[in-house]
Image (spheres, rainbow, N blue to C red):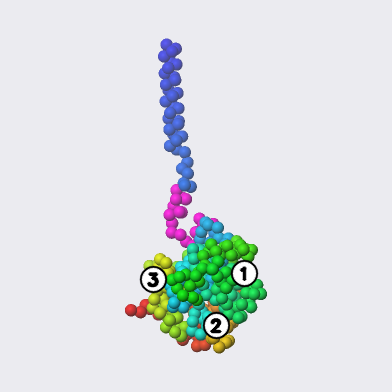
Amino acid sequence: MKRSLLLILLAVLLLMGGCIKKVAKDERPTDNSSSEIVEQNETTQDPVDSEQFSNFYPLTGMATNDDTEHRAIAVMVNNHPKARPQTGLSKADIIYEMYAEAEVTRFLAVFQSEMPKEVGPVRSARDYFIKLAKGLDCVYVCHGNSPDAKEMLDQGYIDHLNGLEYDGTLFQRSSERKAPHNSYISFENIEKGAQQNSYNLTEKPKAFTFLKKSEMELLQGEPASFVQISYGSSSFDVEFSYDEDSETYSRYSNHQQTIEYIDETPIKINNIFIIEAPHKVIDSVGRRDIDFEAGGKAYLLQKGKWNEVQWENREGRIVPVENGKEIGFVPGKTWVNVLPDKPGISRLVHLGAQEN
């Protein structure tokens, strides 16, 4: 009898234990942290506002979890028709376009968030390009120089690599083009040259101001889906066309789209910043002096809209300003076109709807 009672009591205890375990398993508080992480990671990336990113790139405003402590590299890129298509431009954070001499324009391509395998054709320096590179604390890369630029480089005004010194070593000549349109340099060799000269490559530039998502949604302005910029020659005149789907501008020279030489990747731009600055011809070759201290009138194009603003030089950086306050760029790539203040951008720039 006692044995039977003990067996019954044991069975009851085992049954109760199973129920307790089941309740404990089914009713424990739900941990939603893992599902919240998944949900956050599946949302659209917001370059500035997203809290899941630890960093952002100072020259594009794009958010990232990667290390951004890298010095900017500024490369003088040839824009002669015989140098097109160029290599590496699609990776540049900012590109400055302006006269080198006469009616020939040249690019200063600034890289910080992305580094292409190779860039070029590399061309000779001008003093005002050097000043722009200095304002972003870049290592400056060129192949050749004007007399004024040579003086600045020789005096150590900026950390630099010049193809006149490293032709055939750090700089390589392409057999597919003729000099002076065939000098290229890899970013591996830029880093090698920087190390040889003890240049610091780990300090990022000061960040530009960028619009937040809420500010972009309220962005106002006149429609500007098509832009024509005159540099006085059909070979160097520029057009930009806006694509509503990607919310970017494509660039054209002489009606030919600006693409990468190797894989024909098109160059896509988020901000077009057009400024007028005092220009002065200083020699018989047609070399110029451009005053980047004066400030003045400018157009800023973003998301298919344009606004007239002012530009100022603030600590060496050319920035858009309105009522004394720096205006934010849309996060992404920026193209800066510099034009003479005479006759000025009101006559040299045509803005409007896409032409058929």
Q: Earlier in the sequence, mark 1 or mark 2?
A: 1
Q: Alpha carbon of mark 2 to alpha carbon of mark 3: how far?
A: 29 Å
State the residue position of label 1.
159
State the residue position of label 2.
277
| Residue nearest the observer in this picture, 75 or 217 | 75
| Identity, as a three-letter code, of the amino acid under mark 1 | Asp
- The range drawn in magenta is 35-54
Q: Secondary structure at mark 1?
A: loop
Q: Is residue 315 above or below residue 197?
A: below
- Looking at the rendering, in which quadrant would you find the N terminus? top left
Q: Secondary structure at mark 2?
A: strand
Kindly identify the residue that appears in the image at 61 percent across and 77 percent down: 150
| Identity, as a three-letter code, of the amino acid under mark 2 | Ala
Q: Residue furthest right?
A: 155
> Where residue 84 sits in the image (x, y, percent)?
44, 74
| Residue nearest the observer in this picture, 19 or 81 | 81
Q: Earlier in the sequence, mark 2 or mark 3?
A: 3
Q: Earlier in the sequence, mark 1 or mark 3?
A: 1
Q: Is residue 117 above or below residue 285?
A: above
| Identity, as a three-letter code, of the amino acid under mark 3 | Asp
| Residue nearest the observer in this picture, 107 or 3 | 107
**Could you classify mark 1 by the number of other residues whose Cα lies within 10 Å: few (under 14), some (14-19), or many (20 or more)?**
some
